[in-house]
Every structure is written in structure tokens, then in C-alpha cells.
Image (cartoon, grey):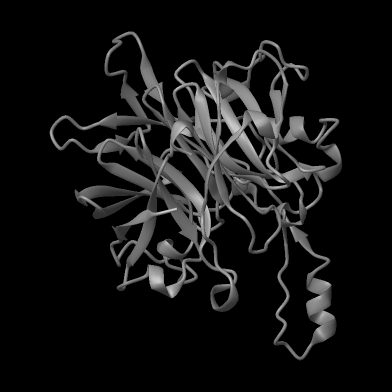
Amino acid sequence: MHSQGHTLHFNPKLSLNADGKHVRDGLSAVLLTGDNLWVSCDERTSIERLRRTGPREFGEHCSYQLADFLDLPADEAVEIDIEGLAEANHYLWLVGSHSLKRKKPDEQSDDTVKQIAKLAKVKADANRYLLARIPLLRNAATGEFELHKEAPHPTDATQTLRAAQLHGNGETNELLDALAQDPHLKLFAGIPGKDNGIDIEGLAATPAGQVFVGLRGPVLRGWALVVELRLEEDRHGRLRLGKVPGATETHYKKHFLDLGGMGLRELHLQGTDLLVLAGPTMDLDGTIAVYRWPHATTQPTDSLVGGKHLHRLFDVPHGHGPTAGQDRAEGMALLDDTHVLITFDSPADARKPAAHQVIAEAYRLVPEAEK
């Protein structure tokens, strides 16, 4: 499928984390609000905002430290592993992966015993257990969308918008606790994400208050899972899981999607449909495709969505051969009614035409009638 490159320009003063990794090398989620493109890097605790500066250009990079708006469970140096961004009702929503991670061995090391032992070590990063919303308002003077810890509602003087996150204790949160008791998922709660354990990638939010969380893993006998939530603010300003009408598990619906063995890599709302970016669950090169799930937001109960009810729109090229392990599509934003913008984790050198730049790809959402 034909695509058009869009160049993202980053500020060199804002683009490196403590380990020297550039933000462009780990883009994991992307969202467009007006002329502002919001991106996250999976090894940071910040959200980056760019501005449209040309027909296929985004620049004027600025960075928002999430610790200025939220109570991060761990130190600011500990990555959040942000894997989803969404917007609804004047809030920017974000979600961490909620996953465990396994130590990575160094195959070049002479100490084989030590490197094998690394593979037995599993680590939890508390900042990954984050599901939150932050007030997102357009500045009338500049036209830019900005984040706030607290702000008056722009159209309802009786309301105040406040940053809030799902209740947790620094080691887990209400969502992870619920999934760890779920009959389909409890056996995967102690397994690292890249081993087909619980691993969130993808987030969508609706004006009606629905929040959809996509799971990269586990994939169960080829079926991927989307969890539908309702979040409520308690008297302490924390988000709590609310009851979900029609749900078997009280606080969330489960929607199983037949994606041919692929897991969820990103979600995006379009009307009552959800656009789904699907790809490998494991850490490997493999098919990546964009699907449309019609009427996803109107499912009255838990659902089992077979392949014939999902429209495969197009496949996204991925790294292979000399670019193995690179160009893995992870972020998907709606550019307009007929195009999405895809960003890539570990972009190949061809995607980096100059220092502090990276190329994303815009694809047309082909109507069914044109296939």
C-alpha cells in the first residue's frame, strides 16, 4: 500500500534520556489534536508535543514531564513505558504497559553462566502501572493544546478539570489487580510481557466515558483481547474502576478479537468504530496490519469478534533481513477522516534523514467499496 512520509523534527536539547537514547528511537504512541502531534517514547517519563509546520512536517518540539501532573509510583528516572494515548472530554489519557520485563542477556559476553542467569530474572517497574488522564486545553492565544494539572472546564463553569490516575499502591493498581484474578488472564499475571504475559499496548477513550485498553499479550489460542472500562473519580481525586453495564466481570468487559494470532499494538477511535493496529506478541519481526472493528463502542456485553466481522484495511511493512528488529509499527494517529499516521519503534537508518529527525508514514484508510 502506498504511503506518504511525514518528517518529525525534535529539539536536540529535549531528545535524549538519561541513558542517551533519542526519543525518535522508541516512539510507542502517537495522537493528533488540532495541529499538535503528541508522541511518547517507551523509555521516558514525559510526553512530547510537536506542531504542524508544513504539509508533511511536524516540529517546534516541547516536552511535558508527567511528574508535574501525576504522582508517579516510582522515581522519575524509572520509565513509564507509555503504550497508549487518547483524547476525550478535554482530557489526554495515557496508559503504561503494566508489564513485567525479563533481563536481556549479552550474547557477546564471555561469561555465559552469568548471561543465562539473567534470563531467569524478572523485574517490575512501578511506573509502568499507570492509567491516567490530564486536562488538555487549547490556548486561545497560540492555538496550541496544553496540559494542566488543574483547569476550569472551558464550557461548564460548574466543573473543574483535574489530573488523576487509577488508584494504586506503588506496586500495582486496581486494573492489574483485577486482571490478575481474571479467569482468562490470571495465569499470565506473573509472566513478562514479551513472553506472552500481560502487556498493554493501545488506548482509546470515548465522550461517553468508555476507556478501551488493548492487550498485546496474552493472545489466547489466536484471540487478542480488548478490555473496556468505566473510570470514576473518588472524593480523594483518584480514579477508580466503575461498574460496566453488561459485563461478566462487573468492572470491565472483555472483547476477544480474531486477529490471526496477532496482539494489539494500538487502538484509535473513529466514530463508533475502533481502528486496530495488530502485530506480533513476542519480540520478533512479523506481520503488522491495520483493521477496522465496526461498532466497537456499542457492544452491549462481552464479545467474541470473529475475523469476518473485522475489516483488514492494509498491512504495514516491517524490518527484515538487514533491517531485522527495526521499523516496528507501534503508534497510530488519525490524521483526518481518511488517513492514519504510523510511527515506528527502532526506526531503520533510512527513516532518520538527519540528526533529530524521523519519518513517520501516512496511510489511506481504504473504504470497503474500493477493495
Residue 81, image x and y in percent? 56, 51
Q: Is residue 365 above or below residue 127?
A: above
Q: Is residue 110 above or below residue 262?
A: below
186 sits to left or right of 192: right
Q: As rendered, which of 363 and 198 lies closer to the eye?
A: 363
Q: Quadrant of residue 361?
A: bottom left
345 sits to left or right of 24: right
Residue shown at 64%/28% (left/top)?
Answer: 309
Residue shown at 63%/64% (left/top)?
Answer: 285
Total tally of numbered discs in the picture: 0
Residue 199, image x and y in percent? 68, 46
Q: As rendered, which of 259 and 42 lies closer to the eye?
A: 259
Q: Quadrant of residue 138?
A: top left
Residue 323, image x and y in percent? 54, 74
Residue 120, image x and y in percent? 83, 66
**Residue lying at the far front of the rendered structure:** 370
251 sits to left or right of 68: right
Residue shown at 50%/70% (left/top)?
Answer: 19
Residue shown at 61%/32% (left/top)?
Answer: 310
**Residue lying at the far bottom of the rendered structure:** 110
**Residue lying at the far left of the rendered structure:** 141
Q: Quadrant of residue 156?
A: top left
